[in-house]
Image (cartoon, rainbow, N blue to C red):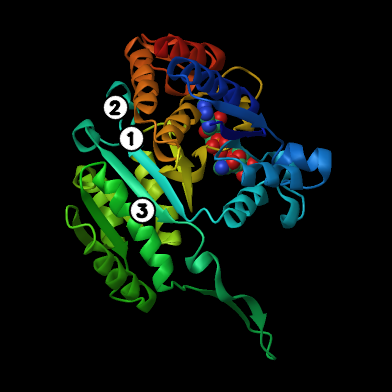
Amino acid sequence: MTEKIAVFPGDGIGEEIAEEAIKILDVVNHKYGFSIEIEKALVGGVAYEKCGNPLPDDTLQLAIDSDAILLAAVGGPQWESLDYSVRPERALLGLRAKLDLFANLRPAKIDPALIDSSTLKREVVEGIDIMVVRELVGGIYFGEPKGVTKNKDGVEKGINTLVYTTPEIERIARVAFEMAQIRNKRVCSVDKANVLESTELWRRVVTEVHNDYKDVDLSHMYVDNCAMQLVRYPRQFDVIVTTNLFGDILSDEAAMLTGSIGMLPSASLGSEKHIRDNLDYGYKGMYEPVHGSAPDIADQNKANPIAIILSVAMMMKYTFGYPDAAKDIEDAIQNVLNGGYRTQDIYTKGMKQVGTKEMGQLIASSIK
Ligand code: NAD
């Protein structure tokens, strides 16, 4: 049975790093005898230039018809003055909403070879391996009413509404508990239940869902404390599950613990299962590096392709149920870093500096 991956390179460094990710997909496809088929399409600024729409209908249809999507990055200064409705970044929101990608997974794991790239002390960050599970299509970013109104005296009022329903909380809690079951069996649910009623409901529902996952330890933490604990003693965390807004902030904070933005992958999963031979192996989803399109280094063979290659590893794990292939990719990256090879963003004295293509090739060769 053929498994279909849509690849959307997008803008800036997108094309260069997507090419290296495809190289890795080809290698694992061949090594393990998978039937993975890849189809590319335009998204973001390049799609706007060609079709007047950052998310053309053909691209959206391909996303809907695929088992997984690999998106490199969108955006660039040349599109910053466009109307908000056709800005490249709208494509991301469109894909998340249309595919109902409600669970955003952002791992923050420190690579032992790069420990000194972190701005925090070695003894604080050593050994951290955190998965932030952020609810992605609800909460204050989407709640109604919202907007800015003006009263008759000319006083303006800005409104956003924090809304969560029981089913929305239940489904994200299940993803977090399932994630913890294949990791270190601890979930910390982050809320502001002492002040915000909607997150009081969040805490109650997460606690109820926990009854189905008794092999996992559950703790609760207020968001302000969590922000502090992440820099004080980050090793205490395994899986953090939280709302859209809190997750947006905490996942960036957790990411910074690891040092380099060019190293961080992410996954956004929907509720539709990926079925192969009548068995479900994971969730359909979209996989992306955490970084943007880095226009300052585009087309110079300088971009670090590791974040997008790690996104491919997440895809193998969470959509296709191929954990061996995922581990192979992760081990290959580790080998190459242990061999002293670095792109310019993670280069330190005494290491061997390589470009995007060379880094991709080294990782691909290490998998073979
Ligand atoms: P950015 O992540 O693109 O770049 C920030 C800095 O990190 C730059 O110095 C860049 O050179 C460096 N960098 C990023 N990725 C790198 C990589 N793989 N290898 C080496 N260095 C890397 O963030 P920005 O400059 O704020 O945004 C640039 C554009 O990207 C904007 O248009 C923004 O809207 C867009 N953006 C897109 C996404 C996305 O597609 N998911 C996310 C963030 C920003």
Of pointers 2 and 3, the one earlier in the residue sequence: 2
Label 1 secondary element:
loop
Tell me the kind of residue under disc 2.
Ile
Quarter of the image holding residue 254? top left
Q: Are marks 1 and 2 in contact (CB under 8 Å)?
A: no
Pick the residue in front: 90 or 285. Answer: 285
Q: Position of residue 111 (x, y in %)?
A: 31, 27
Q: What label sits on residue 175 in the rendered view? A: 3
Q: Counting other residues with Cα less than 10 Å from the Cα at mark 1, is it few (<14), some (14-19), or many (20 or more)? A: few
Q: Amino acid at mark 1?
A: Thr
Q: CA distance from mark 1 to mark 3?
A: 31 Å
Residue at the spot of label 1:
119
Please give the residue where the numbered disc 2 appears in the rendered image.
115
> Which of the 4 quarters of the picture holds residue 313?
top left
Measured along the vertical axis of the image, is residue 26 above or below residue 144? Answer: above
Q: Residue at x 47, y 14 (%)?
A: 364
Dot 2: element? helix
Disc number lying in front (1 or 2): 2
Q: CA distance from mark 2 to mark 3?
A: 29 Å
Q: Position of residue 297 (x, y in %)?
A: 61, 25
* Mark 2 burial class by Cα count in 10 Å: few <14, some 14-19, many 20+: many
N-terminal label among 1 and 3: 1
Q: Give me the residue at 26% from left, 60% from top.
A: 225
Of badges 2 and 3, nearer the viewer stands 3
Q: Residue 214: horizontal and vertical position, in percent?
A: 17, 57
Disc 3 packing (10 Å; few <14; some 14–19; many ≥20)? many
